[in-house]
Image: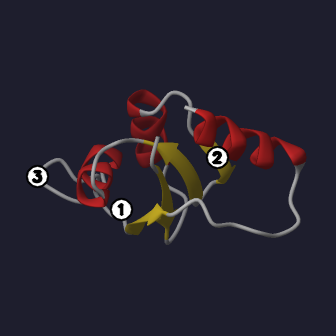
Amino acid sequence: MPMHAIVLWEANPNVAARIAEKYPLHYAVNETFYLVRSPEIAEKVACAAGIKGDNQVEDALGVVFKLNSAYSGYAPRSIWDWLITGEEE
């Protein structure tokens, strides 16, 4: 399933709550960076998270990127497990 990165300019508990509600299997890298799986386009993910649209969370600033399954780096094992699980779906 396609993956998206949600990047917030600053932590926002209301956006975090929306992400958790809409994407219960999300991966929170930290309070400003989330990974979600969704077949939707990036704009729909941004609206669902509350950083765009008619139901935008007040003072929420952020951007959504659709990921192309190309990634590399050094990070905790849990993020690699989450990414691999998404590729198997």
Task: Write down the residue under mark 2.
Answer: 28
In the orientation shown, which residue stands out farthest toward the left? Answer: 54
Closest to the observer, 78 or 2: 2
Q: Is residue 72 above or below residue 19?
A: below
Query: In the image, residue 33 lies at what x, y percent?
Result: 59, 59
Q: Secondary structure at mark 2?
A: strand
Element under disc 3: loop
Return the disc, 2 or 3, that comes first in the chain's sequence.
2
Determine whether label 1 and label 3 are within 8 Å by CB: no
Tell me the crowding category of disc 1: few under 14, some 14 to 19, or many 20 or more residues within 10 angstroms, Cα based: some
Q: Which residue sits furthest front?
A: 88
Residue found 53% across the figure and 67% down from its top: 10
| C-alpha span from label 2 to label 1 | 17 Å
| Precedes in sequence: disc 2 or disc 1 | 2
Label 3 amino acid? Answer: Asp
Q: Nearer the viewer, residue 9 or 70?
A: 70
Tag shown at residue 54:
3
Of labels 2 and 1, the one closer to you:
2
Label 2 to label 3, Cα distance in Å? 25 Å
Taking the spot 56% from the left edge, 30% from the top edge, the residue there is: 25
Pinpoint residue 9: horizontal percent, then vertical percent.
Answer: 49, 72
Q: Left or right: where does residue 47 sit relative to residue 60?
A: left
Q: Which of the two discs, 1 and 3, labels the residue nearer the N terminus?
A: 3
Query: Which residue shows up at 56% across the image and 50% down it?
Result: 35
Rounded to the nearest whole Å, what is the CA distance between mark 1 and mark 3? 13 Å
Q: Which residue is under mark 1?
A: 60
